Structure formats: C-alpha cells, structure tokens
Image (cartoon, rainbow, N blue to C red):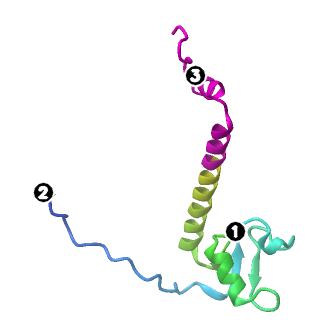
Amino acid sequence: MIDRPRPRGRPRKEPEAPVASGVSREAIKVLGKRLFGRKDLMPGVIVRLGGEITQERAEWAIGMGLAVWVGDAKAELEAGDRRRLAANKAAAESTMRRFDMMSARERAEARDEPEEGQDV
C-alpha cells in the first residue's frame, strides 16, 4: 500500500444540475450548425417547442451540445467545451489515420527523422 497524504478539506459535492430560475423549458437556443438540417435553425436562433420540434428532439439536441435551454448560460459554456473537444478529437483521429496510411519513408520524412542507415 502506498502512503499518500490525506486530501485536505471537504470533498466537493457535484450538484444535480438544478434548474436555474431564469431557464425556460419551453424554448431552446441553437448553438450548432443547422439544427435538424433546417436552414431556419442556425446558431443563435431561439426556437419554441411544439410542432416539429418536440421535447425529445430538443433534449437530443441539448445532449449533443447543439442547443441549450434559453437562459442556461452554464450549459451554453459546457456545450462549447464539448464541441471544441469533439473537434480536437476528430482532428487527431484524422491525423492518425493519415499517418497510418503513410509508408515508412513518408513517416520518417513527416517526423524529420533520418532513415535507418542514413548519415546524420
């Protein structure tokens, strides 16, 4: 058993995301590109639930980070972080796929490393 110092202070409690007083559950604010493929649902647009936008579709968009409930500033910041993380992850996976498709020589050139047997 490894002796570790005891954590200082009280453990932090994560609140179960209570609904803020200014948050409206009747409308969503679009954050992502073209929500549900519609041209009228671009970033920044506020959409009321009802008709084509059901509660389930709104919750799906919120879960994917493409929309937030109107007035939920904390969720808007978290959605932005999720989108940035997803974009960085996609870029890294693309770079890894490209690197995997390279030959050994192309990889060495990409790393700027001399090939085996070359003078340094």
Drawn side of residue 20 relative to residue 36, left or right? left
Quarter where residue 50 is shown: bottom right
Q: Mark 2 points at which residue?
A: 3
The percent coordinates of residue 95 (x first, y second) are 64, 42
Q: Which amino acid does label 2 sit on?
A: Asp
Q: What element carries label 1?
A: loop
Q: Distance between the residues labelled 2 and 3?
A: 44 Å
Q: How far apart are marks 3 and 1 (CA)?
A: 41 Å
Q: What residue type is labelled 3?
A: Asp
Drawn side of residue 13 relative to residue 33, left or right? left
Q: Can residue 43 be seen in this view?
A: yes
Neighbour tally class for label 2: few under 14, some 14-19, many 20 plus, Cα within 10 Å: few
Q: Name the residue under label 1.
A: 31
Q: Is residue 68 visible?
A: no
Seen at 56% across and 73% down, the residue is: 75
Q: Mark 3 points at which residue?
A: 112
Quarter where residue 48 is shown: bottom right
Q: Eyeballing the image, is 116 above or below 29?
A: above
Main secondary structure type of the part rendered in magenta: helix
The percent coordinates of residue 114 (x first, y second) are 55, 17
Q: Which amino acid does label 1 sit on?
A: Leu
Seen at 40% across and 80% down, the residue is: 15
